[in-house]
Image: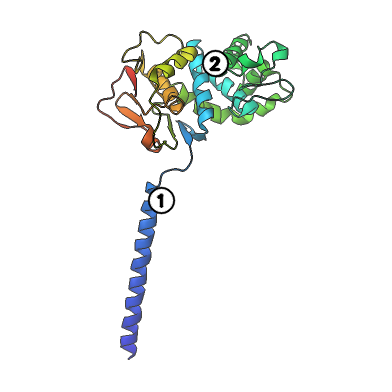
Amino acid sequence: MARRFSKAVLTIIVIVVVLIAALFYGVYHLLNKAKPLGEFCQVKGPSGVLNLEIEQAQIAATIAAVATRRKLPDRAVEIAYVTAIQESKLLNLPYGDRDSVGVFQQRPSQGWGTVKQLQDPVYATQKFFAALVKVKRYQKLPLHEAAQAVQRSADGSAYAAHEEDAKILAAAFTGRVPKGVHCWYPIADQPPAPQPAKARKELVRALGDLGAASGDGTRIDASSERRGWLIAAWSVANARRYSLRQVSYAGVTWKSDSGHDGWLADGKAVAGRVDLA
């Protein structure tokens, strides 16, 4: 009787262990396949990963594009990022301390521009860089000191807390790191038609001349690999805004309906040109 009881108990234990293992295996793979909830952009750099709201990614992409248009170094982009993160969390705010508005919380009363102008991220970024390049030896200064020289904030040391994040953003959005930006968001059952021509027009405002349009504005030439990745990152960050369904470049493609998967191999994606659809 004891032997039979022992065999029965052993059998039950084995069954329970198998069931637990099967349950664990199923949950593990379910979690691995689960799509991220909500809407975000993920930014990858050599020193880490950041998750941004889509508006934050759009503004970060604009800052990098304006800097590239002005032929400014990555150091200038990092200074702009520490400033924008501290001042507005990379958001285009319609309010602020006293009469401050926009990404950099610039004040119309201090000669930065009108309220309407300063709520245009392209304009606000241009004004920030115009002031930054006048700071003597700004490239040699610590990031927070260079930012403070432009902003003249009550506490310039606060900018220092964002230096690591700024370096990750600069590496990805300037195109120095390939495939550094991808976004995901819910897709409507009947999404509006893609607007690549409008996307191109807005990119021109920030980045400058893109050359002759081809493919009804769906093709943007890239004179270098880094410039191509900058354009690709900007396009993905602005994909929801212009209903873009995919962005292709240099052997990979990002698609809006599977954006959480990032950049996937695509033999039709060519180097030297970013394709929008």
Horizontal side of 70 relative to 28 (left or right) equals right
Task: For the residues labelled 2 and 1, say whether their Cβ atoms are less than 8 Å apart.
Answer: no
Q: Nearer the viewer, residue 92 or 264?
A: 92
> Furthest residue to the bottom?
1
Q: Nearer the viewer, residue 10 or 121?
A: 121
Label 2 – label 1 distance at C-alpha: 40 Å
Horizontal side of 133 relative to 171 (left or right) equals right
Element on which disc 1 rests: helix
- Picture residue at 69% right of the left edge, 25% below the top: 96
Which amino acid type is marked by label 2?
Val
Instruction: Decide which of tag 2 and tag 1 comes sooner along the chain.
Output: 1
- Picture residue at 41% right of the left edge, 44% below the top: 35
Q: Residues within 10 Å of mark 2 (few under 14, many from 20)?
A: many
Residue holding disc 2: 122
- What is the quadrant of residue 172 in the picture? top left
Q: Quadrant of the N terminus?
A: bottom left
Closer to us: mark 2 or mark 1? 2
Q: Position of residue 64 (x, y in %)?
A: 50, 19
Residue holding disc 1: 31
Q: Is residue 217 above or below residue 179?
A: above
Q: Is residue 191 above or below residue 13?
A: above
Q: Nearer the viewer, residue 238 or 269?
A: 238
Q: Residues within 10 Å of mark 1 (few under 14, many from 20)?
A: few
Which amino acid type is marked by label 1?
Leu
Element on which disc 2 rests: helix
- What is the quadrant of residue 145 in the picture? top right
Q: Is residue 263 above or below residue 249?
A: below
Q: Position of residue 160 (x, y in %)?
A: 63, 28
